[in-house]
Each structure stands twice: as structure tokens, then as C-alpha cells.
């Protein structure tokens, strides 16, 4: 049985259980029906025998009833030992053996006996006849009752197999319909395994199981639909991540290898060694930033990016970030202006917040032309702080805008410029903002620049402290 399919086992179990239930039900119905027919026959015998007993008790010499030419009723007057005192003609012709007479009080006894020609139901009624205990025996054939029972058995014999066949057909249909989501799940899981294992199906849509009910199988189908979609999204992200990471790491590794091989080809002057080592150090820093960024993003993906809940002044963190970005801005003659209120208390992770602001500031410097201005503002607003960094750069096209927070994605052709996080900056920024419970927004216009907006909730005691008026500062070349 274990080698059979689940469909067959469920159908066999269902048919066996329901078939046993039907057999028991039909057996009980037959027993009740048979007992009721016997009861009705006993009642008819009793209705005929009781008036005879009363008549005999009132008129002892009147025993003419035993001389009547009865056909279907047998009558006899017996003593308590069972010996006949008087009897009808048919009783004489076909004597009945009624067995021992063990009465309980004055209650009649009913028995089924067999004569030479028929099966009869006998009622034995005890009574007193002229002070002498006697028994009136009245019997009637059971042929009509037996005929009804035979017909009923015939109906049950035909009905039971028909019911089993009907149950088998219904169970086959119902079990097949109930297990169809599982069969579809098996097919879709096989298709999903093919999609995941074969990169040629990288753009295929995730399998979807039709969930037409709200029962457990319907909920299972809905759960697997969501699982397929999430796993496929993760697999695609992983493939893209591996592809992008290998692409980003290939260039600095090739430079490191080339510079090292060049140094080893021949002896050189110390100045040349120093120059080449500076290149190697720059690429090592670039690799280190990529690795640190990947580590941060992997922690964020796993939900394990832990942030410190330190009490800081977010205005000071933003001002320090502007000061750190000022040398890059001066190199391009870019002016950084600040509109930052004084003493804005905040609860968060100071190093991560500093990295967050530097990512936006360095991107703004990188993609802004010379002699432009980057405007930085900090605005408290009903339990939140709004940080805005606006540049006057080239802007972002509508095609690139949905992807700017993807890893290793650059919307600008400046692919060789050094960035703080090796192409992971905005992805890291989004992870930091999400970890602090905030949101990022961007507005851009081609040829006029972009404005990034970060909204962070002020948590803890910081939300209740007073707000101080803002001051204007600037960093220029």
C-alpha cells in the first residue's frame, strides 16, 4: 500500500471507511425493520388471543373456537406442562412443538417454531380456567413477514454495491479535485527548479499556483506563490550581485596585479616605487570600501544591521560631514551652503549617520560641474527631521531613476571616478535610513540637478527637546 499513490490511498481509505459505515448502517436498518415486523406480528396475535382468553375464562364450557376450520391460525389449550387439552384441526394435523413453558408472572411468551409445512410465530398466554392454570397457544404463519424481509434484503443487496460504486466515483472526483493543487504545486516546483538552475530563464516569471479556495490547500498554494516570487527575486538579485561585484572587483585587482608585476620586472628608483605604491594603496582602499559596503548591505539584507541608540545632535553630525566633504568641493570650486538649526537632539548611530550624509555630499560633488552650489538643509517637523541635499549637477533621467538605489548602478557616464563606497553608496544610504526607520526621496531635473531628501524619526527624549533657530554657513573654495 505504501507504494501506491497518495490519491489511491486516500480513495481506498475513504471507500473503506464509508463502505463499512454503510454496511453497519444497512445492518442496523435491517435489524430495526425486522424487529418492527416481528413486533407487529406479535401484536396481531395478542389482539386475537386476549379476547379468546377472556371468553374462555367467562364461559369455560365454550370451546367451540377450537372446532372452527381455521386455515392460517393455530389454536391450542395446553396445561402448564405443555400437554394439549384441546386444539384446532390444523394443530392436530400439524402438531407444533412450543418448547418448555417458563412464564414470568402472567406475561405471555412469543416463540418462532417450524412445522412440517411452514414457519409460525406462537404466542403463549397463561390464564386460569376454572381454578386450573392453563395456556392458550395461538400461532400464525410468518410467510408474509418473511417475504417482506426477503424483498428488503434484495433491495439492500442491490443498493449496497450501487452505493459503494457511487461512493468510489465521488471519492475519485473529490480526492482528485482536492489534490489538484498539490499536483500543480509539484509541476510548478519542478518548473521553478529549472528556472533557478538555468540562467537562460533569468527573465522568466515565477510559477503561480491557482488558489481557488480558502481552505488549507488554498492557503498552501498562496504561500508557495509568495515563496516562489521571493526566492526568484533573491536568486536574481544574487546573480546580479555576483555579476556586478565581479565586474567591480576585476578592475582594481587587475590594476594591483599589473602594478605589482611592473615593480617586480626590474629595479627602480625610490620615487618610482613610491608612485606605484600610491596607486596600489589607492586601489586597496577602493577594494576595502567595496568589501565594507558589501558587508554592510549583507547585514542589512539579513536583518542584522544593528544601529546604536546614542543621544547625538544631528545638526553637529551634518556639519561635520559637510566639513569632511569640503576638500573635495574646493578641488572643483564648488560651494557648500548649510541651513542647519542649532542643537537638534536625535537618537541614532552617529558613525552611520555621518556615512549617510557623506554619501550624498560626495555624490553631489562628483556629479556637479565646477563653480556651482550644493545646498544642505536640516528642518525639524512634528517628530521627524528633514535633511535635504540639493546640487546643480546634470540630473538623473527617468530611465535611470528607478535603479539609482541598486547596487553597483551608476546613472552617470563617470564610471572611473572614485566613490566612497565603490558603486554601493546609495544602496548603503537606503539601508542606513531604513535601519533608522526613515525614508529617502529624490527629485531631479535634467540639466538642473537633483535633490535628495531624507526623513528620519526623532525617537526617545529627543522629540521633546526645544528647537533652536537656524544659522547659515558655507564652505567655498
Image: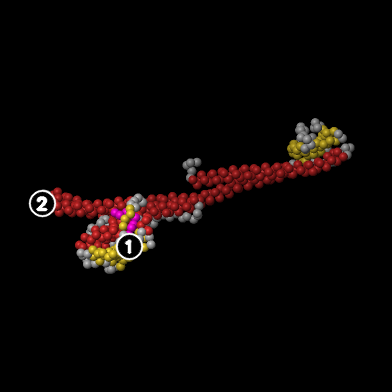
Earlier-in-chain disc, 1 versus 2: 2
Comparing 386 with 462, the one in front is 462
Q: Position of residue 154 (x, y in %)?
A: 66, 45
Left/right placement of residue 278 relative to residue 125 reads left
Mark 2 lies on a secondary structure that is: loop
Camera sees residue 90:
no
Mark 1 lies on a secondary structure that is: loop
Residue at the disc numbered 1: 468
The disc label shown at residue 430, or none: none
Residues at discs 1 and 2 in contact (Cβ within 8 Å): no
The magenta span reads 344-351
Residue at the disc numbered 2: 269
Q: Position of residue 383 (x, y in %)?
A: 38, 60
| Magenta-drawn stretch contains 411 | no
The residue at 13%/51% (across/down) is 273
Q: Residues within 10 Å of mark 2 (few under 14, many from 20)?
A: few
Q: Position of residue 121 (x, y in %)?
A: 75, 39
The residue at 73%/42% (across/down) is 38
The residue at 36%/51% (across/down) is 303
Q: Quadrant of the C terminus?
A: bottom left
Left/right placement of residue 201 relative to residue 131 reads left
Camera sees residue 162:
yes
For marks 1 and 2, give the CA distance.
59 Å
Image quarter of residue 357: bottom left
Image position of 216 with respect to 2: above or below: below
Comparing 377 with 413, the one in front is 377
Comparing 20 with 347, the one in front is 347
The residue at 61%/45% (across/down) is 22
Q: Residues within 10 Å of mark 1 (few under 14, many from 20)?
A: few
Amino acid at each position: 500500500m505504501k507504494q501506491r499513490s497518495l490519491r489511491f490511498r486516500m480513495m481506498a481509505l475513504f471507500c473503506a471507511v464509508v463502505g463499512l459505515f454503510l454496511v453497519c448502517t444497512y445492518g442496523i436498518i435491517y435489524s430495526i425493520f425486522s424487529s418492527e415486523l416481528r413486533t407487529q406480528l406479535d401484536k396481531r396475535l395478542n389482539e386475537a388471543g386476549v379476547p379468546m382468553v377472556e371468553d374462555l375464562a367467562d364461559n369455560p364450557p365454550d370451546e367451540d373456537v377450537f372446532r372452527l376450520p381455521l386455515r392460517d391460525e393455530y389454536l391450542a389449550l395446553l396445561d402448564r406442562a405443555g400437554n394439549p387439552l384441546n386444539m384446532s384441526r390444523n394443530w392436530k394435523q400439524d402438531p407444533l412443538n412450543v418448547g418448555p413453558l417458563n412464564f414470568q408472572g402472567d406475561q405471555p411468551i412469543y416463540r418462532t417454531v417450524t412445522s412440517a409445512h411452514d414457519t409460525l410465530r406462537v404466542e403463549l398466554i397463561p390464564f386460569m380456567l376454572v381454578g386450573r392454570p392453563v395456556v392458550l397457544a395461538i400461532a400464525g404463519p410468518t410467510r408474509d413477514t418473511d417475504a417482506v424481509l426477503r424483498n428488503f434484503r434484495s433491495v439492500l443487496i442491490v443498493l449496497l454495491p450501487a452505493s459503494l460504486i457511487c461512493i468510489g466515483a465521488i471519492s475519485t472526483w473529490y480526492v482528485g479535485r482536492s489534490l489538484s493543487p498539490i499536483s500543480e504545486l509539484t509541476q510548478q516546483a519542478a518548473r521553478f527548479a529549472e528556472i533557478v538552475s538555468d540562467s537562460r530563464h533569468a527573465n522568466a516569471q515565477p510559477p503561480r499556483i491557482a488558489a481557488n479556495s480558502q481552505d488549507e490547500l488554498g492557503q498552501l498554494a498562496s504561500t508557495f506563490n509568495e515563496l516562489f516570487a521571493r526566492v526568484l527575486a533573491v536568486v536574481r538579485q544574487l546573480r546580479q550581485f555576483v555579476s556586478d561585484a565581479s565586474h567591480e572587483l576585476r578592475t582594481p585587482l587587475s590594476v594591483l596585479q599589473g602594478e605589482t608585476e611592473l615593480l617586480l620586472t626590474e629595479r627602480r628608483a625610490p620615487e618610482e616605487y613610491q608612485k606605484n605604491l600610491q596607486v596600489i594603496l589607492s586601489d586597496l582602499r577602493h577594494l576595502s570600501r567595496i568589501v565594507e559596503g558589501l558587508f554592510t548591505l549583507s547585514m542589512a539584507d539579513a536583518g542584522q544591521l544593528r544601529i546604536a541608540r546614542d543621544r547625538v545632535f544631528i545638526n553637529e553630525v551634518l556639519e561635520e560631514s559637510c566639513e569632511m566633504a569640503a576638500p573635495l568641493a574646493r578641488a572643483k570650486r564648488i560651494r557648500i551652503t548649510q541651513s542647519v538649526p542649532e542643537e537638534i537632539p536625535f537618537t541614532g548611530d552617529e558613525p552611520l549617520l555621518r556615512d549617510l550624509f557623506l554619501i550624498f555630499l560626495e555624490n553631489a560633488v562628483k556629479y556637479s560641474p565646477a563653480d556651482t552650489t550644493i545646498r544642505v538643509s536640516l528642518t525639524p517637523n512634528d517628530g521627524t527631521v528633514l535633511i535635504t541635499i540639493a546640487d546643480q549637477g546634470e540630473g538623473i533621467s527617468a530611465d535611470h531613476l528607478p535603479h539609482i538605489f541598486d547596487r553597483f548602478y551608476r546613472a552617470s557616464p563617470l564610471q572611473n571616478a572614485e566613490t566612497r563606497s565603490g558603486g554601493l553608496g546609495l544602496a548603503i544610504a537606503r539601508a542606513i535610513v531604513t535601519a533608522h526607520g526613515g525614508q529617502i526621496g529624490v527629485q531631479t531635473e535634467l540639466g538642473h540637478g537633483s535633490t535628495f531628501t531624507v526623513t528620519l524619526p526623532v525617537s526617545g527624549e529627543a522629540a521633546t527637546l526645544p528647537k533652536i533657530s537656524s544659522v547659515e554657513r558655507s564652505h567655498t573654495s
